[in-house]
Amino acid sequence: MQGRFYEEINTDSPQQALYIMTKAFRIRNNYALHALTRFDHDLRHVVVFHKEEENPRNNEFFNQLSLDLKDKLLQITDDIRFTTGLEDITSLIEAVDIVYIDKAYLKEDKALLVEIKTICNNAQTGLVTVENNVFVPVVVASDKEEYAARTIRPKINKKLEYFGDTVLMDEEGCMGEREAYEMLHQFVSRKLDHYDQRNDPSKHYTSDLSAYLKYGFISPVQIYHIIIEQSSPNKDEFLEELIIRRELAYNFVYYNENYDQFDHMTYDWAYKTMDNHILDKRDHLYTIEDYKTFNTHDKYFNAAMKEMIVFGQMSGYMRMYWAKKIIEWSKNYQYAYETALKLNNYYFYDGNTPNGYTGVAWCFGKHDRAWTERHIFGKLRYMNANGLKRKFDIETYVKEINQLVEEDNE
Ligand SMILES: Cc1cc2nc3c(=O)[nH]c(=O)nc-3n(C[C@H](O)[C@H](O)[C@H](O)COP(=O)(O)OP(=O)(O)OC[C@H]3O[C@@H](n4cnc5c(N)ncnc54)[C@H](O)[C@@H]3O)c2cc1C
């Protein structure tokens, strides 16, 4: 567990301690909260720091599921505050001896950390960042931006045993935690055995845990311990997504400062192939408004857009298809990238995460390889509707989404 803590600023006698909870909104298996209780601090403060997202639906989701977080935290600490901005807590940071904070990965979180570090430096307050939301701490897993899953996999697997510790497991968690555990148990009992068929969007064999992981309502370490106990032949496939793919995404945004910029998010071979195909004739050209109003000629794509806009989610395979179609139907690649990212981060409950930036970049070749040359796509991996029809019960998916939307309108 030691490797999860990074002392940014040292302190000698930490009597009053503060944990600024920014990414792991949970009681159970929260390493920072555990550190707060472990040492002999005279006073323990917790600030629940949640910056509002652009989409009110995401804020509502978070607010609902963290409604009883305060009550749960009161069992452990002396003083709890909720805030959406730094100005409310500056004097508290100045008053305590040590601050623990969840590790920052995305730009806005890193910017917040810099501000907090400045306040701590000026006030001579100690500062410790805690890797609370990944299995293997990002900087321990690798010291550089990794090329692909195959390059990070052995590095992570080697360290799993060392970072498997769990803490504070007897405390009852908040509503988001309880809901996440319930979903995990449903997944294990009903879906894990079918997880190898997860790509079929009509089947719903995935865990739906991504939004809960985003807010840290559940820890990947805790999920791992439950999955590893199972006898299902699919457990390794699930752990590959939960740990290797997810932590590859964290590696990407942590080490690539321009992870959200079209010109910097993918590889040279991918930019070269896009340059070679920029003038290819597009048979369909759509705008972001066409997507939002389900106004394309492709009923599979429109169904996926409905799932996204009305329900805030989309199954994993359809996300790939969806972003690939945006590439095919956009006036240029940069417009496609910006459109996909904008929709992804606004509409998905699990948007604004390392996974979102990485998932979209993957459609532009990141962490992927070059494929056979195609119209518009060049060497980027190509996907088409015939693939959906051949592999899945895609008509059932479309019917089901349309029905759910109708019911939602009633
Ligand atoms: C274009 C595109 C956009 C995406 N946008 C997002 C996003 O905004 N937020 C997001 O969390 N994921 C995103 N993904 C990754 C993946 O599709 C989702 O994590 C997954 O569909 C979430 O459903 P689940 O929780 O049921 O997944 P499960 O299959 O049950 O997987 C369990 C967990 O593993 C992780 N995981 C699964 N697949 C991936 C993957 N390919 N890459 C990284 N981690 C993975 C997730 O945290 C997920 O919750 C995107 C993928 C693509 C191709």
Image: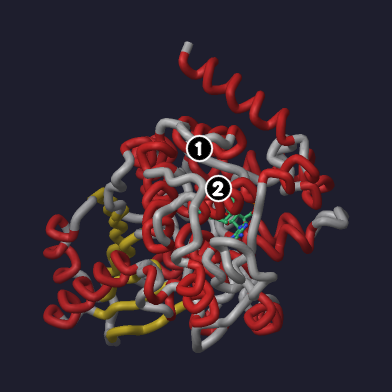
Front in this rendered view, residue 377 or 217:
377
Q: Amino acid at mark 1?
A: Met
User: From this viewpoint, is residue 171 visible?
Assistant: no
Count residues near mark 2 (Cα–Cα under 10 Å), then give few for <14, some for 14-19, many for 20+.
Answer: many
Front in this rendered view, residue 374 or 264:
374
Residue indicated by mark 2: 322
Tell me: residue 358, above or below residue 83.
below
Contact between labelled residues 1 and 2, with CB atoms less than 8 Å apart: yes
Q: Residue at x 49, y 56 (%)?
A: 281
Q: Which SS class for mark 2?
A: helix
Any mark on residue 305, and which? Answer: 1
- Quarter of the image where one finds residue 373: bottom right
Quarter the N terminus occupies: bottom right
Q: Quadrant of ligand 1?
A: bottom right
Q: Is mark 2 within 8 Å of ligand 1?
A: yes
Residue 60 in the image, given as x and y percentages of width and height: 36, 36
**Residue 76 relative to residue 147: left or right:** left
**Residue 164 relative to residue 342: left or right:** right
